[in-house]
Image (tube, helix red, strand yellow):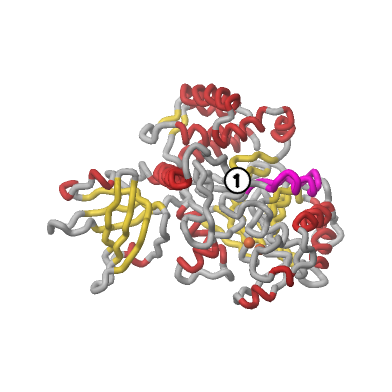
Amino acid sequence: MAQGDLRDHLVAYFEDHHKFLEAGALQLLLKDHHPLLLSRQLLEGTPTDSPFVTQAMVEAMIARRAVSTSSGVAGFARLDTAVRSPASARVAAEPFTLIAEGFNEPNAAIGPLGAFESLFLSRYRALHHLLSGRPDLPNVRSLSELRADHGAASVIVMIREVRQTAERKHLILQVEDESGSAELLVPRDSPAAHEPYVSDEVIGATIVFPRERGRLPRVQSVQRPDVPRTRVGGRASRPSRVLFISDLHIGSRSFLDRAWDRLSDFLYGRGPAPELAAEIRHVVIAGDLVDGIGVYPKQERDLAIEDIFEQYAELGRRLAQLPNTLNIIAVPGNHDAVCPAEPQPNLPAKLREQLPRNVRSLGNPSTFALDGVVIEAYHGRSFDDLIPALPGASYARPTEVMKRMLAMRHLAPIYGERTPLAPLPRDGLVIDPAPDILVTGHAHTYGVDQHRGVLLLNASTWQAETEYQRMRNISPVPARAAVVDLTSLRLHSLDFSSEVPRVNGPPN
Ligand SMILES: [Fe+2]
Ligand SMILES: [Fe+2]
């Protein structure tokens, strides 16, 4: 990233968190090996009520980092170790920067219940951070200190349950914060009553107390953390493009090998638009790299390769078929051979060894910068929970759900349904920083949209329709790929499903 771009990016990042960077602090961050990572550490380590990030705070954080690296504390230390090792000096020189993996080390000292408690506390605090200090949420109070004589106030709360009153059809939000729980009434005629709420999401609400004693506080308006409209996006300062694909499902009988060969030809400049192919430096794969085994009932009937190790060996061969100059980044999905609870770790070493050297295996989700453009890659398992929870949402239009993820600044808030959540100390599914591009898979459809300047992509699949999907009424849109120009975020859609691949460019 060019120094000027990085400066803008850092300032915008702190603004997003309602923090002001002192000039000295900014200088120190710009000089650091890993400014984005250090910025995140600063936000997590500075007191919520201070709006300033001072030079002294940055110095203290750098000192703390040196200590935690040697003692191996928490997830950041692991990343920091990577930053300091000689291998990472090479990585820093490459156009790839890891910002954060969702997966972080479990805390073995606390039991499972305590672990979930600290997971939700981490989520609440991270999103509280994004919501506090906003002009549209004045007079923020904790639930325990709310009193009728405060008149109007705001609260920042996690939603536990939503129900409707039997007679008048008002909504009752059962909510919690760090101080306790409460019920809030959303009058049925208010705009806030017409939007869907998702359990375990964090919202800000302005409330008023009715004159009558004993009545519930009423919600006047609701604010979600969302992506700030003022955010400055990152852009590459040299020509560079990234190809997005997903859901290869290697090992499935339905893997589209002919379409894959066409993709490979295209990348070698032997297909349409060779000038486009020539500028592609990166490939991002959003999970379900292989079909796995025992993922759904009677899956063995759909498998061409029944051994999981062999599936990854074949994945390695398929990826080696692409030009070895590409920087390939792959996150796992729910079909891959890692723990299905999210955030998922990256592939075990034994499977990583099967992949070519130009493939970087990261956890799901992961946030990284490619030539200065911040990308969040998430497989998208939570579509299975969010689609039923959001009226009008469907697998055919996953980008609509992705807009809601950005508004909530969370990839998979709902606990206890189909997406298993890992009880880790830090909630790695909070979307922070807001990316320039959010890419998902899992829906097996192709979708492009944008939300407040963030490009949204659902990156198709290389698996034709399976019997299981027919049964579940899912119609895939396979063999599509998106090529994004990192200098402008302009996008070409590629279709390899027929003999002659098609390229659709952006309107001029
Ligand atoms: Fe999939
Ligand atoms: Fe999936």
**What is the crowding at mark 1: few (fewer than 14 residues within 10 Å), some, or many (at least 20)?**
many
What residue does disc 1 label? 367
Residue 177, percent from left and from top: 34, 47
Query: Depth check: 51 or 312 in front?
Result: 312
Q: Quadrant of the C terminus?
A: bottom right
Indicate yes or no whether the magenta region holds residue 252.
no
Q: Residue furthest right?
A: 270
Residue 194, percent from left and from top: 36, 67
Is ligand 2 closer than 8 angstroms to the Cβ of mark 1?
Answer: no
User: Image check: 302 left or right of 378?
Assistant: right
Task: Tell me where the magenta segment starts and ends, as one range.
Answer: 347-363
Q: Quadrant of the N terminus?
A: top right
All told, the count of numbered labels is 1
Q: Amino acid at mark 1?
A: Thr
User: Image check: 190 left or right of 270?
Assistant: left
Residue 327 seen in the figure:
no
Residue 316, percent from left and from top: 80, 52
Q: Is residue 303 above or below residue 74?
A: below
Query: Depth check: 239 or 315 in front?
Result: 315
Residue at the image point whose x is 49% and y is 23% from the top: 60
When asked about the image quadrant of residue 129, the answer is: top left
Q: Is residue 60 above or below residue 415?
A: above
Residue 81, percent from left and from top: 64, 30
User: Image check: 177 left or right of 215?
Assistant: right
What is the secondary structure assignment of the residue under circle 1? strand
Query: Depth check: 470 or 31 in front?
Result: 470
Indicate yes or no whether the magenta region holds residue 361.
yes
Ligand 1 quadrant assignment: bottom right
Residue at the image point whose x is 29% and y is 44% from the top: 142
Residue 491 seen in the figure:
yes
Query: Depth check: 443 or 54 in front?
Result: 443
